[in-house]
Every structure is written in structure tokens, then in C-alpha cells.
Amino acid sequence: MTYYFNSSRPTRRQMLKGMGAAASGAAFALGAPSILRAQESALVVVSGGGSYEEAIRQAVLDPFQRETGIKVTYVTPAEAAKFKAQVDSNNVQWDVVELSDPAFRSDAAKYCEEIDYGAFDKETLDNLVPEAKTKYAVGSYVYSTVMAFSTAEYPADKPRPRSWAEFWDVSTFPGPRSLAGGGDFSTIEFALLAAGVPKDKLHPIDLDKAFASLDRIKPHITKFWTVGAEPGQLLSDRQVAMSSAWNGRMQLLKDQGAGVDYQWDEGELFPLHWVVTKGTKNRTAAMQFVAYQATAQAQARLNNLIFYGPLNRAAFKYIEPGVAAKLPTAPENIDKQFFLDLAYWQALSPSGKTNAEVLVDRWTKWVAR
């Protein structure tokens, strides 16, 4: 079996670039539950390319076509601007798209079909985490932004920060740091956690408090990273002692023997979703697809291949135990973390901009000071 990993945050950066690591198992021998065979029709499914495309074809698309008789055309990349333009011009070519943001915006009803949960079997509905079941989107998988370390600076037998408040404590835990830049949601929320805000009380975001907290750590930040590969490089080269990072990147480097490690405490879970394009001519088939990919077996097949987590809790019955422990939604990992609130960040602020846009404006001014 080949493992793939997500090199970036979809909807804002390049989607999934893969690197291989050998492992054994029989995940693809798992069969997905039978879904009522539909009349054959072409269904256009849009998401990332490269190794992610290889993984999703094997784990989801090919089995879906075999079991339903629905032909799938896979297109890449998923671009929010193109998605919106197709609806605005009444020229819809994409049926199902792996984009989270459109489903959480105030104009979601204009661009996304409401999800027909009647197409889902009861077992799937019972086991999907709440963040995966939304009005206009269905969860696909989740990754986490975690706290990572240089093992040269912080070996396993040396005390390490276990919270963002301790990450901010440069006296007890010395060494240069790195955090995600560009107005990244995780950096703002970690700053609030460091300031003593409980993880279940983060919203509405207090930007004044967040940036005051960032003022304290800024002198100790070597670099605000913007590309998923950067934290691993900074840690491996000992340019920083600790950094926020994506769990899949860190796990892959760790398995390759690089001098990095990470922990799950106060990690931010970022869920990815499928949306069905408003005005699709293949609505029934599209609903069958989003229901199919949400089943435990389909999610298990996919997440046996990428270091990210299923949103169907029952998928862990089919995921190899050695793999499961490395996934952010494993039972022993998920409760240590918190989910990013996409609805909050896409909601309109009093200024008429989304909260995400307000954050970017504030960040741009702050980082230039």
C-alpha cells in the first residue's frame, strides 16, 4: 500500500501533493455498502490532482462507479472562482466539488444545492461527526494544525510545551518559533488559547486580544510560514525549536527519520467538505456520490492512504491500527483538539466583509509594523 499526504490547505493553497511511504495491508479489499444502482449518467467530480487524485480514484471513485453504474469524470483543480462563475453564468459543468468555503458563506443557497440526507444510510448519519453534516456540504476528511518540535532541541526525554500558553512561555521553553502567517485562522486561535481563552469559548473572535497575544510572541518568531513544507524544513535545519505545522507533513517526515516530532494537544481540526453545485443536471447522482464517500468503508479506504482523518467515526473499524493512531480524528486524538468554525469565519462582519477578510486586513497591517 502507498501512503499519500496532504501538503496544503485546500481552498486557500495548492491541493494535496504526495510523497510515498511503503506499508502493508488490505484496505482496498474492503467493500463499500451497496447503494441502489442508478441509471448510468456522467457525473463530474472536482478536487485536487497529483497523488490525491490517485488515492481518491482507488479508494472512492472506482468503487463508486462499479457499485452504482454511474460514470464519473474527474476534474482538477477545484477553484472557487470557477465554481462561482459557472453558477452565475447558468453554465454549470461541475456537479460535485471539494470546496468548503462556498457552503458556509451567507450566499450559500445561491451556489450550493441543499444536501439530501435522505440519500444517506442510517449507519452513516449516526456516525458522522456534527461538523460533517451541514446544510450545504458533507465532510470528506479532516487534517490538523498541531504543535511540532525539533527533536534536536526538544528530544522525547526533555519537557516540551503541552499547550499554546506554554508555547508562548519562552522563559520555560526557550528557542525560536514559527507560526502560520498570512492571517491564518489557526495562528489567531492559538494566540487566544495562549491568552487563556478556553477552546470552547474562542468565538466570537476577540481580535484585539489575539493580536495583543501575538505582540508578545512576535519577537521570538523566526518566520511566519505560508507553505506547508516550511515548518518541517525550519525544524529539521534547527532554525526553530518549535512551530505550528500540519500533522500529515510532520508524520511523513517523522517516519522518514527526520528530527521532528509533534503532539495533538490543542490542535486545530480543519474539516474538508464536498458541495453539490446549484443547478447541476445530475443532482440525484451527485447526492449518491456525497453519501457514498461519507460511508465508513469509503472513508477508511481513503484514510488508510493519507495521514488525515475520517469524519465518519465508524471508519476506524476498517483502518489499520498502526495507521489509526496517526490520524487526527482517532478516538484518542480528537478530544484533545478543537474544530475550526468555518461558519464563523465566512460570516459577514458589520463592515460587510467576511470575518476571514477582516482578519487578513488586520494581519497585513500588524505584520508590517
Image (cartoon, helix red, strand yellow):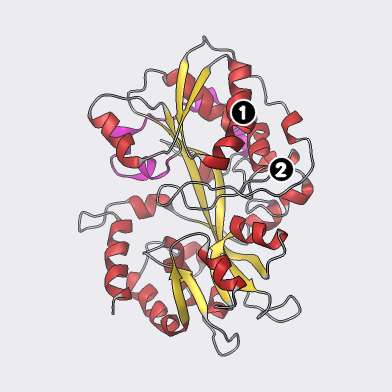
Which residue is denoted by mark 1 in the rendering? 122
Q: Is residue 57 left or right of residue 227?
A: right
Highlighted magenta segment, given as a residue range = 99-127
- Please identify the quadrant where the N terminus is shown: top right
Look at discs 1 and 2 and give the one toward the viewer.
2
Query: Is 46 placed above or below 104 here?
Result: above
Give the amino acid type for the residue marked by disc 2 in the picture: Phe
The Cα atoms of the two marked residues, 1 and 2, are separated by 17 Å
- Camera-nearest residue between 313 and 6: 6
**Rendering coords of residue 282 (x, y %):** 42, 18
At 69% from the left and 81% from the top, the residue drawn is 159
Q: Which element carries disc 2, helix, strand or loop?
A: helix
- Could you classify mark 1 by the number of other residues whose Cα lies within 10 Å: few (under 14), some (14-19), or many (20 or more)? few
Image quarter of residue 333: bottom right
Residue 20 x, y percent position in the rendering: 66, 48
User: Residue at label 2?
Assistant: 316
Near-viewer residue (50 or 29) = 50
